[in-house]
Image: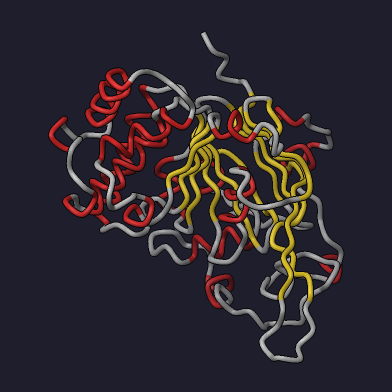
Amino acid sequence: MKNKNEEILEISHVSNRYRDSGAGFFSRSKMTRVLNDVSLTIHRDEMFGLVGESGCGKSTLGKAVLGMIPFEGQIRVGGMEYTRKNRQEFTSAVQAVFQDPLSALNPRRTIAQTLEEPLLAHGIGTPQSRREKAVEMLELVGLDASYADRLPRELSGGQRQRVCIGAALMIDPDLVIADEATSALDVSVGAQILNLFQEIHDRKDFAMLFISHNLNVVYYLCNRIAVMYRGSIVEQGDAESLYNAPLHPYTRTLLSAIPEIDAGDELSRYAYQETRREPAPDGCDFYHRCPYATDQCKKRPELTDALAAENGTDASEKEREHLVRCWNPVRSD
């Protein structure tokens, strides 16, 4: 029996930058940081949510884990570090489900051919066994065998996404990355896909990194949540404590957009205001938007365990339950 506490994904001090050529012909190029020293761990059988607004770097982190872009730092999946030499072995351990199912599917391939493709790429099985597994996978994602010989254009958006989920699971990966996997779907269909993720996760043995801009969706699906802002993790904890007792002002700002959550009028006023004060180059990333910022915030805080800091203890990595990157975490009344 596999150990559920096994560390499936280990991200250690990962950073990423890209060269921005500028808008004008004579503009000078500059390096823009997308990820800033990101570290997190996901255990086997865990549903882990990564949430943040558009442009915060969450999808870039997913691409780094998939080996699609260069990065600084270290990423390990199932104890294996990604290198160019072990790319095929690495991709068998981590698979992805993306936002747009139509663009992810080859319009000329039948659904069975799409599902069998990962097995073919890794030299697994015979034509007959691959076909049988494709049909089994269709049933697992809520489609019957009659879909096997259809083309993507004959399916609805929700059905296509079910096929994409099935394709990601064909080689039994240790980790599945779902990047905005429901945002392109109708609300009702998206809810069905969320329930499908949960049902499959209960039956299969894999960890999931679920990336979304919607904190409600992440809370519904995931055991633990990390909140990202401007390329940094600003808060991380179990779903209940982070959703019901957020510590970082930015997390409370995200919650202030949800009608049933009262994050306070002061935070609501600054929820999407970008120019309240000048940014602090070496300080907290949220300094320019935070209504609670002080001069101390001009220095960048570390991601620390708030409960251990309160009790005057130094919690080990495994004991940390609620991490926050803030000098003065905001407590609920």
Give coordinates of residue 5: x percent, y percent: 60, 20
Give coordinates of residue 7: x percent, y percent: 64, 26
Report whether 175 appears left or right of 157.
right
**Closest to the observer, 35 or 223:** 35
Give coordinates of residue 105: x percent, y percent: 34, 49
Report whether 330 appears left or right of 251.
right
Give coordinates of residue 175: x percent, y percent: 53, 32
Q: Is residue 38 visible?
A: yes
Q: Residue at x 55, y 77 (%)?
A: 269
**Closest to the observer, 90 or 181:** 90
Q: Is residue 333 visible?
A: no
Which quadrant would the C terminus be assigned to in this image? bottom right
Q: Residue at x 33, y 50 (%)?
A: 106
Q: Residue at x 58, y 58 (%)?
A: 251
Q: Residue at x 58, y 43 (%)?
A: 66
Give the quadrant of residue 144.
top left
Report whether 23 appears left or right of 210.
right
Spot the residue most to the left.
146
Report whether 279 appears left or right of 205.
right
The image shows residue 142, relative to residue 231, as above or below, that is above
